[in-house]
Image: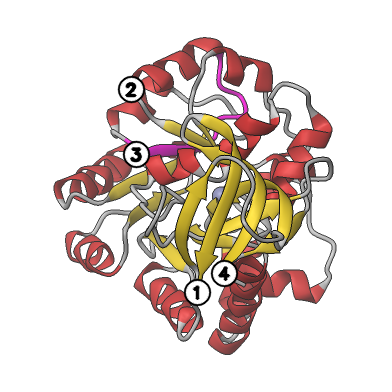
Amino acid sequence: MQYVKGDILTHDGFKKGYLGFEKNRLIDLRSGSPPEKPLAKGLIVPTFVNSHTHVGDSFIKKKKIKLPRNVEDLVAPPNGLKHRLLEKASEEEIIDGMKTSIDEMMGTGTSYFCDFREDGINGVYLLSNALKNRKIGSIILSRPQQMSYDKNEVELLLKNSFGIGLSSISDWEYSEIEKIARHAKQGKKIFALHASEVVREDIDLILDLKPDFLVHMVLATESDLTRVKDENISVVICPRSNAFFNLKMNLKLMKKTKVDLMLGTDNAMLNIPNVLKELRYLRNSTTVFSTQELLNMITYTPRKALNLDDCIHGPNSSGNFVVLDRKSLKSVYISNK
Ligand SMILES: [Zn+2]
């Protein structure tokens, strides 16, 4: 048996103690000191969930081109630079980029990621292809190829993915997005979308779609966030992506309204999908959140929102964990590496 010692992040906050484990299986979770010298000491937390990625554009990062720092020109469908580059790229190039991102996540303690796939059913196949022989949980959210609703297409997408993840309502004809959302909900699948990233969008229209979670909410007002909290909908924030586009979230408001927050790394062409880096970036740019609150954004909160059950509950759970240095929050030990 091997041991790690320190402050274990549980559902109820940090508890002092140690974990005993064997072959990635947790045998013991106790207070006090382990019977043998621990492999590592520090903050012991469940492996991470990266709640928002677009790994499909990883290949663009490799091109090292100067990207426009404006959402409309870079990522808005269908004419943003990203979509034009995707159209020109070969499937092999896209899949290779995806593999780089997946390996980055696997190597840095992420056990699940939630990807907003573009390019219709083909986009789902590309990611499934990149995931072959790689051990990581993937929550693939797909979207129609065109900006319109087609019953058969959505049926196929829902069959082959965890649900639908769309760009914002501003990009869409509302009646089309409504039909897609309703279809996803009827199929008991996830429906999520980007919201209020560069302009404040109508929260009533957004909530009428019954989303499972929202991404960004940079320009949301206090009442928007309160409505979201009241509906029990979590929000994924992507601080490094916002910073790239010079968008400023109101973190104090987010904390005040107590909306459940999760962290995502957003477009892989902007930042490598290391969600712990995203967390450290947020910690360095604000004092609004405690270490515990920050760590919950990449561990327990997304697991609750995405219905994942792979945590370090106690003896015999299969949950993997990461030990972090208390000060730097850099990982000193990753159990599933
Ligand atoms: Zn996004």
Mark 3 lies within 8 Å of ligand 1 (Cβ measured): no
- Foreground mark, 3 or 4? 4
- Foreground mark, 3 or 1? 1
Whichever of callouts 3 and 4 sits on the residue coming sooner in the sequence is: 3
- Foreground mark, 1 or 2? 1
* Disc 4 element: loop
| Residue placed under numbered mark 2 in the picture | 231
Residue 178 image point, x, y percent: 27, 40
Quote the CA–CA distance across marks 3 and 1.
Answer: 35 Å
Q: Does 218 appear in magenta?
A: yes
Mark 2 lies within 8 Å of ligand 1 (Cβ measured): no
Q: Residue at x 68, y 75 (%)?
A: 59
Q: Residue at x 39, y 30 (%)?
A: 233
- Magenta stretch, main secondary structure, is loop
Q: Looking at the rendered structure, which numbered label has been put on residue 23?
A: 1
Whichever of callouts 2 and 3 sits on the residue coming sooner in the sequence is: 3
Which class describes the residues within 10 Å of circle 3: few (<14), some (14-19), or many (20+)?
many
Which class describes the residues within 10 Å of circle 2: few (<14), some (14-19), or many (20+)?
some
Quote the CA–CA distance across marks 3 and 4.
Answer: 29 Å
| Residue placed under numbered mark 4 in the picture | 336
The N terminus: image quadrant: bottom right
- Tell me the amino acid under the disc marked 2: Glu
- Foreground mark, 1 or 4? 1
Whichever of callouts 1 and 2 sits on the residue coming sooner in the sequence is: 1
- Tell me the amino acid under the disc marked 3: Asp
Q: Find the magenta span and give its range.
A: 211-221
Residue 136 image point, x, y percent: 48, 70
Q: Does 52 appear in magenta?
A: no
| Residue placed under numbered mark 3 in the picture | 212
